[in-house]
Amino acid sequence: MLICCGLTTLDITQVVDALPGPDQKVVATSQRATFGGPAANAAATAVALGVQTRLVTAVGAGVLADVVRAEIADAGVELLDVTTARSAGDGSRATGPAVSTVLVTAGTGERAVVSTNATDRPAAVTDRTVVDRALGPSGPSRSRAGVDAGTGGESGRDVLLLDGHHAPLALALASSAREAGFLVVLDGGSWKAGSADLVALCDAVVLSADFRMLGVAADGTLEAVARLGPSFVARSRGPAPLEVLDAGRRSSVGAPTVDAAAVVDTLGAGDVLHGAFAAEVARGRSFASALSAAAVVASRSVTYEGARGWIGA
Protein backbone atom coordinates (compact mmCIF):
# COMPACT_ATOMS: atom_id res chain seq x y z
CA MET A 1 0.00 0.00 0.00
CA LEU A 2 1.05 3.60 -0.62
CA ILE A 3 0.36 6.42 1.82
CA CYS A 4 0.82 10.01 0.64
CA CYS A 5 1.11 12.78 3.23
CA GLY A 6 1.19 16.47 2.45
CA LEU A 7 -0.50 19.37 0.74
CA THR A 8 -3.91 19.35 -0.92
CA THR A 9 -5.23 22.48 -2.62
CA LEU A 10 -8.15 23.67 -4.67
CA ASP A 11 -6.58 24.70 -7.99
CA ILE A 12 -8.28 27.43 -10.02
CA THR A 13 -6.61 27.16 -13.42
CA GLN A 14 -7.02 29.50 -16.39
CA VAL A 15 -5.35 29.11 -19.78
CA VAL A 16 -4.15 32.35 -21.38
CA ASP A 17 -2.35 33.25 -24.58
CA ALA A 18 0.15 35.32 -22.59
CA LEU A 19 0.58 36.30 -18.95
CA PRO A 20 -0.83 39.72 -18.07
CA GLY A 21 1.50 42.59 -17.28
CA PRO A 22 1.02 45.16 -14.50
CA ASP A 23 -2.49 46.68 -14.54
CA GLN A 24 -3.40 44.52 -17.54
CA LYS A 25 -6.45 42.30 -17.91
CA VAL A 26 -6.54 39.28 -20.21
CA VAL A 27 -9.32 36.88 -21.19
CA ALA A 28 -8.78 33.20 -20.48
CA THR A 29 -9.38 30.71 -23.27
CA SER A 30 -10.48 28.04 -20.78
CA GLN A 31 -10.71 27.42 -17.06
CA ARG A 32 -11.12 24.58 -14.60
CA ALA A 33 -11.37 24.07 -10.84
CA THR A 34 -10.20 20.84 -9.24
CA PHE A 35 -8.06 19.53 -6.41
CA GLY A 36 -4.30 19.81 -6.63
CA GLY A 37 -1.21 19.85 -4.46
CA PRO A 38 1.85 17.58 -4.56
CA ALA A 39 0.57 14.85 -2.26
CA ALA A 40 -2.95 14.83 -3.71
CA ASN A 41 -1.80 14.65 -7.33
CA ALA A 42 0.72 11.95 -6.44
CA ALA A 43 -1.99 9.91 -4.74
CA ALA A 44 -4.31 10.16 -7.75
CA THR A 45 -1.42 9.15 -10.03
CA ALA A 46 -0.71 6.05 -7.96
CA VAL A 47 -4.36 4.99 -7.99
CA ALA A 48 -4.44 5.45 -11.77
CA LEU A 49 -1.47 3.07 -11.95
CA GLY A 50 -3.36 0.47 -9.92
CA VAL A 51 -1.85 0.99 -6.46
CA GLN A 52 -4.12 1.29 -3.41
CA THR A 53 -3.42 4.71 -1.91
CA ARG A 54 -4.36 6.70 1.18
CA LEU A 55 -3.98 10.49 1.27
CA VAL A 56 -3.22 12.02 4.67
CA THR A 57 -3.78 15.75 4.44
CA ALA A 58 -5.66 18.83 5.65
CA VAL A 59 -8.83 19.57 3.68
CA GLY A 60 -11.01 21.28 6.26
CA ALA A 61 -14.65 22.30 6.14
CA GLY A 62 -16.93 24.41 3.98
CA VAL A 63 -18.12 24.44 0.38
CA LEU A 64 -14.63 24.42 -1.16
CA ALA A 65 -13.57 21.55 1.07
CA ASP A 66 -16.65 19.60 -0.01
CA VAL A 67 -15.63 20.04 -3.67
CA VAL A 68 -12.10 18.84 -2.96
CA ARG A 69 -13.28 15.91 -0.88
CA ALA A 70 -15.75 14.76 -3.56
CA GLU A 71 -13.16 14.92 -6.35
CA ILE A 72 -10.59 13.02 -4.31
CA ALA A 73 -13.17 10.30 -3.76
CA ASP A 74 -13.95 10.25 -7.50
CA ALA A 75 -10.23 9.72 -8.14
CA GLY A 76 -10.38 6.53 -6.06
CA VAL A 77 -8.12 7.87 -3.31
CA GLU A 78 -8.84 7.04 0.33
CA LEU A 79 -8.82 10.31 2.29
CA LEU A 80 -7.79 10.88 5.90
CA ASP A 81 -8.42 14.55 6.72
CA VAL A 82 -6.44 15.53 9.81
CA THR A 83 -7.36 19.21 9.83
CA THR A 84 -7.50 20.65 13.32
CA ALA A 85 -11.19 20.77 14.30
CA ARG A 86 -12.54 23.70 16.27
CA SER A 87 -15.81 23.86 18.11
CA ALA A 88 -18.64 25.31 16.05
CA GLY A 89 -19.81 27.13 19.17
CA ASP A 90 -16.63 29.09 19.90
CA GLY A 91 -17.27 31.77 17.29
CA SER A 92 -14.47 30.59 15.00
CA ARG A 93 -14.86 29.91 11.30
CA ALA A 94 -13.92 26.56 9.82
CA THR A 95 -10.83 26.62 7.63
CA GLY A 96 -11.20 25.34 4.10
CA PRO A 97 -8.52 23.97 1.79
CA ALA A 98 -5.53 25.94 0.57
CA VAL A 99 -6.28 27.63 -2.77
CA SER A 100 -3.92 27.95 -5.74
CA THR A 101 -4.42 30.31 -8.68
CA VAL A 102 -2.75 28.89 -11.77
CA LEU A 103 -2.14 30.59 -15.13
CA VAL A 104 -1.11 28.27 -17.96
CA THR A 105 0.33 29.81 -21.12
CA ALA A 106 -1.17 28.28 -24.25
CA GLY A 107 1.42 27.16 -26.76
CA THR A 108 4.19 26.47 -24.24
CA GLY A 109 2.35 24.77 -21.37
CA GLU A 110 4.34 26.85 -18.87
CA ARG A 111 2.55 27.73 -15.66
CA ALA A 112 2.61 30.47 -13.04
CA VAL A 113 1.23 29.60 -9.61
CA VAL A 114 0.17 31.66 -6.60
CA SER A 115 -0.85 29.58 -3.58
CA THR A 116 -1.61 29.95 0.11
CA ASN A 117 -0.02 26.52 0.64
CA ALA A 118 -0.52 25.06 4.11
CA THR A 119 0.70 27.99 6.20
CA ASP A 120 -2.61 28.65 7.98
CA ARG A 121 -4.04 25.14 7.84
CA PRO A 122 -2.48 23.22 10.73
CA ALA A 123 -2.57 19.44 10.58
CA ALA A 124 -2.95 18.10 14.09
CA VAL A 125 -1.04 15.17 15.52
CA THR A 126 -2.42 15.27 19.04
CA ASP A 127 -2.03 11.62 19.98
CA ARG A 128 -0.94 8.22 18.72
CA THR A 129 -4.41 7.55 17.31
CA VAL A 130 -3.89 9.97 14.39
CA VAL A 131 -0.64 8.30 13.34
CA ASP A 132 -2.09 4.82 13.74
CA ARG A 133 -5.09 5.73 11.57
CA ALA A 134 -2.79 7.15 8.92
CA LEU A 135 -0.47 4.15 8.72
CA GLY A 136 -2.77 1.19 9.18
CA PRO A 137 -4.07 -1.18 8.28
CA SER A 138 -1.90 -1.23 5.19
CA GLY A 139 -0.03 -4.32 4.16
CA PRO A 140 1.82 -7.22 5.74
CA SER A 141 3.79 -6.20 8.81
CA ARG A 142 7.51 -5.73 8.22
CA SER A 143 10.40 -4.77 10.44
CA ARG A 144 13.16 -2.44 9.20
CA ALA A 145 15.52 -5.41 9.27
CA GLY A 146 13.34 -7.10 6.67
CA VAL A 147 13.14 -4.14 4.30
CA ASP A 148 15.61 -4.13 1.43
CA ALA A 149 15.86 -0.44 0.65
CA GLY A 150 15.18 -0.39 -3.03
CA THR A 151 16.78 -3.50 -4.51
CA GLY A 152 13.50 -4.84 -5.85
CA GLY A 153 11.64 -8.05 -5.31
CA GLU A 154 8.62 -10.13 -6.18
CA SER A 155 6.25 -8.82 -3.52
CA GLY A 156 4.96 -5.31 -2.95
CA ARG A 157 5.98 -2.98 -0.17
CA ASP A 158 4.38 -0.47 2.14
CA VAL A 159 5.55 3.01 1.12
CA LEU A 160 5.10 6.45 2.68
CA LEU A 161 5.46 9.42 0.30
CA LEU A 162 5.93 12.87 1.85
CA ASP A 163 5.99 16.27 0.14
CA GLY A 164 7.46 18.22 3.08
CA HIS A 165 4.29 20.15 3.95
CA HIS A 166 2.63 19.81 7.39
CA ALA A 167 6.10 19.16 8.87
CA PRO A 168 5.07 18.00 12.39
CA LEU A 169 2.68 15.46 10.91
CA ALA A 170 5.22 14.35 8.30
CA LEU A 171 7.94 13.81 10.92
CA ALA A 172 5.63 11.81 13.18
CA LEU A 173 4.47 9.63 10.31
CA ALA A 174 7.97 9.10 8.92
CA SER A 175 9.34 7.99 12.29
CA SER A 176 6.48 5.57 12.92
CA ALA A 177 6.48 4.33 9.33
CA ARG A 178 10.15 3.37 9.52
CA GLU A 179 9.51 1.44 12.72
CA ALA A 180 6.66 -0.37 10.96
CA GLY A 181 8.87 -1.36 8.02
CA PHE A 182 7.69 1.17 5.43
CA LEU A 183 10.01 2.59 2.82
CA VAL A 184 9.91 6.39 3.20
CA VAL A 185 10.14 8.58 0.08
CA LEU A 186 10.36 12.38 -0.07
CA ASP A 187 9.22 14.69 -2.85
CA GLY A 188 11.86 17.38 -2.37
CA GLY A 189 10.26 20.38 -4.02
CA SER A 190 12.13 22.93 -1.93
CA TRP A 191 14.16 23.18 1.26
CA LYS A 192 11.80 23.92 4.15
CA ALA A 193 12.06 24.31 7.90
CA GLY A 194 12.60 20.82 9.29
CA SER A 195 13.75 19.36 5.97
CA ALA A 196 17.01 18.03 7.41
CA ASP A 197 15.18 16.02 10.07
CA LEU A 198 12.73 14.71 7.49
CA VAL A 199 15.40 13.73 4.96
CA ALA A 200 17.22 11.78 7.68
CA LEU A 201 14.17 9.50 7.98
CA CYS A 202 13.92 8.81 4.24
CA ASP A 203 15.14 5.90 2.12
CA ALA A 204 14.76 7.77 -1.18
CA VAL A 205 14.49 11.46 -2.10
CA VAL A 206 13.48 12.82 -5.51
CA LEU A 207 14.32 16.51 -5.82
CA SER A 208 12.97 19.17 -8.15
CA ALA A 209 15.27 21.13 -10.43
CA ASP A 210 14.78 24.18 -8.19
CA PHE A 211 15.76 22.43 -4.95
CA ARG A 212 18.62 24.21 -3.17
CA MET A 213 20.36 23.71 0.18
CA LEU A 214 21.88 26.72 1.91
CA GLY A 215 25.64 26.78 1.56
CA VAL A 216 25.72 23.90 -0.94
CA ALA A 217 26.68 24.31 -4.59
CA ALA A 218 24.06 23.06 -7.05
CA ASP A 219 26.35 20.32 -8.38
CA GLY A 220 26.89 18.98 -4.85
CA THR A 221 23.23 18.83 -3.84
CA LEU A 222 22.73 15.10 -4.36
CA GLU A 223 25.74 14.21 -2.23
CA ALA A 224 24.73 16.68 0.49
CA VAL A 225 21.24 15.20 0.70
CA ALA A 226 22.61 11.63 0.72
CA ARG A 227 24.88 12.46 3.66
CA LEU A 228 21.74 13.12 5.70
CA GLY A 229 20.62 9.50 5.33
CA PRO A 230 18.82 8.36 2.15
CA SER A 231 20.56 5.76 0.00
CA PHE A 232 18.87 6.97 -3.21
CA VAL A 233 18.72 10.61 -4.31
CA ALA A 234 17.56 11.86 -7.70
CA ARG A 235 16.87 15.29 -9.20
CA SER A 236 14.62 16.13 -12.13
CA ARG A 237 15.78 18.68 -14.71
CA GLY A 238 12.77 19.35 -16.90
CA PRO A 239 13.14 17.54 -20.22
CA ALA A 240 16.78 16.62 -19.49
CA PRO A 241 17.73 13.23 -17.97
CA LEU A 242 17.29 12.95 -14.22
CA GLU A 243 20.45 12.99 -12.11
CA VAL A 244 20.79 9.99 -9.79
CA LEU A 245 22.98 9.10 -6.82
CA ASP A 246 22.27 5.47 -5.91
CA ALA A 247 24.28 4.05 -2.99
CA GLY A 248 27.03 6.57 -3.74
CA ARG A 249 27.15 5.90 -7.49
CA ARG A 250 26.31 8.67 -9.97
CA SER A 251 24.17 7.95 -13.04
CA SER A 252 21.29 9.41 -15.02
CA VAL A 253 17.82 8.30 -16.05
CA GLY A 254 16.45 9.48 -19.37
CA ALA A 255 12.83 10.13 -20.26
CA PRO A 256 10.98 9.98 -23.58
CA THR A 257 11.51 13.13 -25.63
CA VAL A 258 8.38 15.27 -25.90
CA ASP A 259 8.24 17.63 -28.86
CA ALA A 260 7.74 21.22 -27.71
CA ALA A 261 4.69 21.51 -29.93
CA ALA A 262 3.09 18.57 -28.10
CA VAL A 263 3.45 20.12 -24.64
CA VAL A 264 0.03 21.27 -23.42
CA ASP A 265 0.47 21.81 -19.68
CA THR A 266 3.43 21.24 -17.33
CA LEU A 267 1.33 21.79 -14.20
CA GLY A 268 1.80 18.91 -11.79
CA ALA A 269 4.32 16.99 -13.90
CA GLY A 270 6.61 16.72 -10.90
CA ASP A 271 3.73 15.47 -8.76
CA VAL A 272 3.03 12.79 -11.36
CA LEU A 273 6.71 11.81 -11.35
CA HIS A 274 6.77 11.40 -7.57
CA GLY A 275 3.45 9.57 -7.43
CA ALA A 276 4.43 7.16 -10.18
CA PHE A 277 7.84 6.60 -8.56
CA ALA A 278 6.29 5.77 -5.19
CA ALA A 279 3.67 3.55 -6.84
CA GLU A 280 6.31 1.52 -8.66
CA VAL A 281 8.37 1.17 -5.48
CA ALA A 282 5.22 -0.06 -3.73
CA ARG A 283 4.86 -2.67 -6.48
CA GLY A 284 8.32 -3.98 -5.58
CA ARG A 285 10.57 -2.32 -8.17
CA SER A 286 14.03 -1.06 -7.30
CA PHE A 287 14.39 2.69 -6.90
CA ALA A 288 16.26 3.00 -10.20
CA SER A 289 13.73 0.94 -12.12
CA ALA A 290 10.83 2.80 -10.50
CA LEU A 291 12.32 6.15 -11.51
CA SER A 292 12.68 5.06 -15.14
CA ALA A 293 9.03 3.98 -15.25
CA ALA A 294 7.90 7.17 -13.52
CA ALA A 295 9.75 9.37 -16.00
CA VAL A 296 7.72 7.83 -18.83
CA VAL A 297 4.44 8.58 -17.06
CA ALA A 298 5.46 12.16 -16.22
CA SER A 299 6.55 12.84 -19.80
CA ARG A 300 3.20 11.65 -21.08
CA SER A 301 1.32 13.82 -18.58
CA VAL A 302 2.54 17.13 -20.06
CA THR A 303 0.77 16.39 -23.33
CA TYR A 304 -2.61 16.72 -21.57
CA GLU A 305 -4.36 19.48 -19.65
CA GLY A 306 -3.77 19.49 -15.91
CA ALA A 307 -1.86 17.11 -13.71
CA ARG A 308 -4.35 14.30 -14.28
CA GLY A 309 -5.61 14.84 -17.82
CA TRP A 310 -3.65 11.80 -18.98
CA ILE A 311 -5.58 9.45 -16.69
CA GLY A 312 -7.97 7.37 -18.74
CA ALA A 313 -6.87 9.00 -22.00
Image (tube, grey):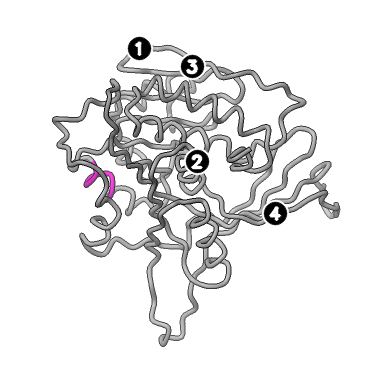
Dividing the picture into quarters, in which one does residue 289 lie? top left
- In the rendered image, residue 174 lying in the magenta stretch gets the answer yes
Q: How far apart are the two marked residues, 1 and 3, measured between alpha carbons?
A: 13 Å
The amino acid on which the numbered mark 2 sits, given as a three-letter code, is: Ala
User: In the rendered structure, which disc, 1 or 4, sits on the residue that comes first in sequence?
Assistant: 4
Rendered residue at 48%/28% (across/down): 294
Residue type, label 3? Val
Q: Which residue is mark 2?
A: 48
Q: Amino acid at mark 1?
A: Arg
Q: Secondary structure at mark 2?
A: helix
Look at label 4 and name its amino acid.
Arg
Classify the position of the N terminus by image quarter.
top left
Q: Residues within 10 Å of mark 2 (few under 14, many from 20)?
A: many
Residue occupied by mark 4 = 32
Name the image quarter holding the C terminus.
top right
Image location (x, y in percent) of residue 47: 46, 43
Q: Residues within 10 Å of mark 1 (few under 14, many from 20)?
A: few
Q: Secondary structure at mark 1?
A: strand
Q: Which mark is residue 253?
A: 3
Mark pair 3, 4: CA separation:
33 Å
Foreground: disc 3 or disc 4: 4
Q: Residue at x 43, y 60 (%)?
A: 58
Q: Nearer the viewer, mark 4 or mark 2?
A: 2
Segment tinted magenta in the rendering: 173-177
Residue 239 lies, in percent from the top left, at 61, 22
The residue that appears at 74% across and 53% down in the rendered structure is: 31
First of labels 2, 1 by sequence position? 2
